[in-house]
Image: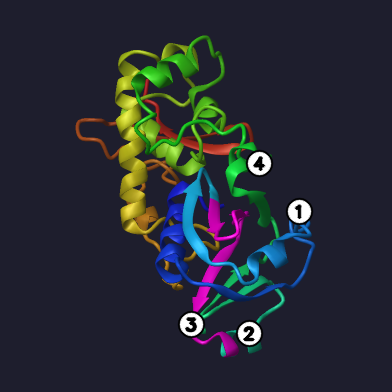
Amino acid sequence: MPELPEVETVCRGLSAAIKGKTITKAVLRRPDMRFPFPEALQPSLQNARVVSVLRRAKYGLIALSNNKTAIFHLGMSGTMRIDADAVQAEAQLGRHDHVFLIFEDGTSVTFNDTRRFGFMDLAESERLHKNRFLKDLGVEPLSNHFHADYLNQALAGKVTPMKAALLDQRIVAGLGNIYVCEALFMAGISPRRQARTVPGKRAERLVPAIKTVLEKSIAAGGSTLRDYAHVNGELGYFQHEFNAYGSAGEACSKPCCSGVIKRIVQSGRSTFYCGKCQH
């Protein structure tokens, strides 16, 4: 499933390609994605100008000139594809191309999702924070609001494992399994440690570790696990720089550590960590 860095990369690519342009044709090709399309989605998209394309957690937000915002989630296998020739792109649409947008300059954007776990929603821009998918989200990990003091308060008294606490979208918005593993590894914190024991010096290490891991991944273009791809079709490559995720049985990459990366299962998800240097 695309995580925060992948969604950020897609939103930046879309913004560069369609910001300021008007949608002259909007086609919703099938209704049976994860959730049905809102009835107002197609007419709200058509003839609207794209004001901005931003990310919130793992959601993409396409703000429109009619004070509506189209919200998209890539699910497990969703991609956004940009084509310079909309006529040719429309003629070649496949069964998994669910949303097709044509812009005034003849380019197009196609939302493709093989597994159909992705979706699109619509909200009044002024009430975006009230949307059912966005209203309970915590702070953005790359924002100035995410700092050690915030994390100290958010984790106080929590007896859940640290990894589970970081995956709680009400605490930090957008963190996923891969990058939580990497951030905990960088900070030297065990994913099994109770969250209530992290406030203090551990939180002071963890916050910059989370920011660094995400920023490095965004700079690298996102990871390419499963079906993720850039809007321009190029695959990211940050997965080659993983230090813990997917490295079970390999030696710890930290200098002066003779530990071995272990794999355990937490809440049905694989967790990778070094039992020696992560405490």
Left or right placement of residue 186 versus residue 6 in this view: left
Where does the magenta region start and end? 60-87
Q: Earlier in the sequence, mark 4 or mark 2?
A: 2
Q: Earlier in the sequence, mark 3 or mark 1?
A: 1
Are the residues tagged 3 and 2 within 8 Å (C-beta)?
A: no
Q: Earlier in the sequence, mark 4 or mark 1?
A: 1
Q: CA distance from mark 4 to mark 2?
A: 31 Å
Say which amino acid is labelled 2: Glu
* Viewer-closest of 276 and 156: 156
Q: Mark 4 vs mark 2: give the one in front.
A: 4
Any part of residue 188 in sight: no
Secondary structure beneath dot 4 equals: loop
> Residue 189 is drawn in which quadrant?
top left
Q: CA distance from mark 3 to mark 4?
A: 31 Å
- The crowding category of the residue bearing disc 2, from other C-alpha atoms within 10 Å (few below 14, some 14 to 19, many at least 20), is some
- The crowding category of the residue bearing disc 4, from other C-alpha atoms within 10 Å (few below 14, some 14 to 19, many at least 20), is some
